[in-house]
Image (cartoon, rainbow, N blue to C red):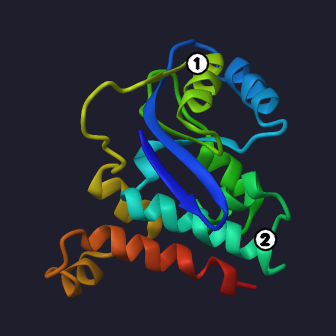
Amino acid sequence: MICAKIGDQFFAISCGKINNDSYSATIKKLTVAQRGNFVQIVPQRFCAGKNHFLIALEHATSALQSNQAITKNLLLEFLVHFFGKRQLDQVFEDAKFEQGEDLIAITDAKEKEHKKILQNLGFEENKSEKMNLQGQKKELMQFYGIGKEELGTLSDKKNALEELVIEKISFVALQN
């Protein structure tokens, strides 16, 4: 689990899988869990790393605070900034996940409450010491429209792909 404070809000992030076989049941539980809490689940395959996730959350909270938000709802605004897309129908399509798929869950709850919320969703947290917030390089490049040439320009960086994804998603607020 990763814990982060963004602005005046506390967030907890976990990697894992949903332990039931019904996407619709999970979405219904997620909807109930979201009442009064920030609870969101995204496919891990679209995450380029910890900074990608945290910066998307930072952009979403900042957009709402500065009245620059696209959706006026932190749950949706986070998805817009995470996927780097303004069209909500496309964002919802991208946010879908399959049974057994690696997922990332985030809540605005402290550790104990975070675990309880995830347990109620049927989310089984990965028990490994090191969280892997990174999807597959090839799929990330294709999804975020990053070419090999672009990646090559930052070859001296530790995680060049994550930096380019962050750059791509940062432009979502500037799009018309």
* 103 displayed left or right of 61: left
Please state the horizontal and vertical placement of residue 126, each as a whole percent of the image.
Answer: 36, 27
Residue 146 seen anywhere in this rendered image of the structure: no
Residue lying at the far left of the rendered structure: 156
Please state the horizontal and vertical placement of residue 62, each as a whole percent of the image.
Answer: 69, 74
* 52 displayed left or right of 10: left
Q: Which mark is residue 64?
A: 2
Q: Where is the N terminus found, in terms of image quarters?
A: top left
Q: Which residue is mark 1?
A: 119
Residue lying at the far top of the rendered structure: 20
* 165 displayed left or right of 107: left
For the point 74% across and 23% down, the residue is 29
For the point 78% across and 37% down, the residue is 34
* 120 displayed left or right of 150: right
Nearer to me, 35 or 18? 35
Q: Is residue 64 above or below residue 21?
A: below
Instruction: Identify residue type, mark 1.
Output: Gln
For the point 49% across and 43% down, the residue is 13
Nearer to me, 2 or 175? 2
Instruction: Identify residue type, mark 2.
Output: Leu
For the point 64% across and 40% down, the residue is 109
Give the structural element (helix, strand or loop) at label 2.
helix
Q: Where is the C terminus found, in terms of image quarters?
A: bottom right
Q: Are marks 2 and 1 in contact (CB under 8 Å)?
A: no
Give the structural element (helix, strand or loop) at label 1.
helix
